[in-house]
Amino acid sequence: MAIIKTSAQGLTANATNLVHIKTITLTSNTTPIQFLNSDADVTFDTTYDTYKFIGNVRYETDSRRTYVRFSEDGINMNTTSGNYETNDISVHDDNVTGGSDTNSTVFFLEDNLTGNATGENMAFEMTLFNNDLGSPRFVANIHYIRTDADDGLTFRGARYMQNVRTKGISFFPNGSTNYLSGSTISMYGVKS
């Protein structure tokens, strides 16, 4: 964890250990939002052992959730069943639940579906541990808002079942739908 240095004027230089790599803000309805090492403006290799993704997205159609896939080569997403294992704790409508999925072709973020009505959205912060200590894994905090005046929180931990560094990540809604214009995800490298 970085210690924030302050002065009488506020933050000083080098006050954080986050290095901004790229922000993607959609200017039209589209999917997916991807960060690939093969892109000229993305560093997704051994430069950082930890990456952070911060997003706020809205969906084109109702009853959606965000799926996540990894790339081992920085170009192609892995769709192999059983490579994505996840566990979660979720709070929604005064209910606390937990679950797991150990044989999937994707990770998913929200536990409950999010819609596309005014005010509905999903925000998340994901930390990806992408080092040589074993399979890539992440933890994510997800908050979603629905029109029926309720919202939910999910804490998700996940593991990619291949012992390789990830060189790309893709965020996309389930089903044949898009993220709405204005949806945004930022990628940061975390300095050790």
Image (tube, rainbow, N blue to C red):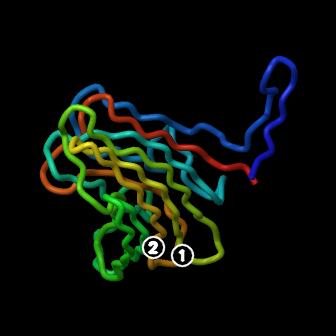
Place of residue 24 in the rendered image (x, y in percent of width and height, measured from the top left): 41, 34
Q: Residue at x 28, y 78 (%)?
A: 81
C-beta proximity under 8 Å, tags 1 and 2: yes
Q: The residue under label 2 is which amino acid type?
A: Tyr
Horizontal and vertical percent position of residue 103: 31, 82
Q: Residues within 10 Å of mark 1 (few under 14, many from 20)?
A: some
Mark 2 lies on residue: 160
Tell which of 34 and 15 is nearer to you: 15
- In the image, 57: left or right of 160? left
Q: Secondary structure at mark 2?
A: strand
Q: Which mark is residue 58?
A: none
Tag 1, which secondary structure?
loop
Where residue 178 appears, x then y in whole percent? 20, 42
**In the image, is 57 to the left or to the right of 126?**
left
Residue 65 sits in quarter = bottom left
Query: What residue is shown with label 1?
Result: 135
Residue 43, how many percent across, how many down? Answer: 56, 46
Which of the marked residues, 1 or 2, is nearer the chain's N terminus? 1
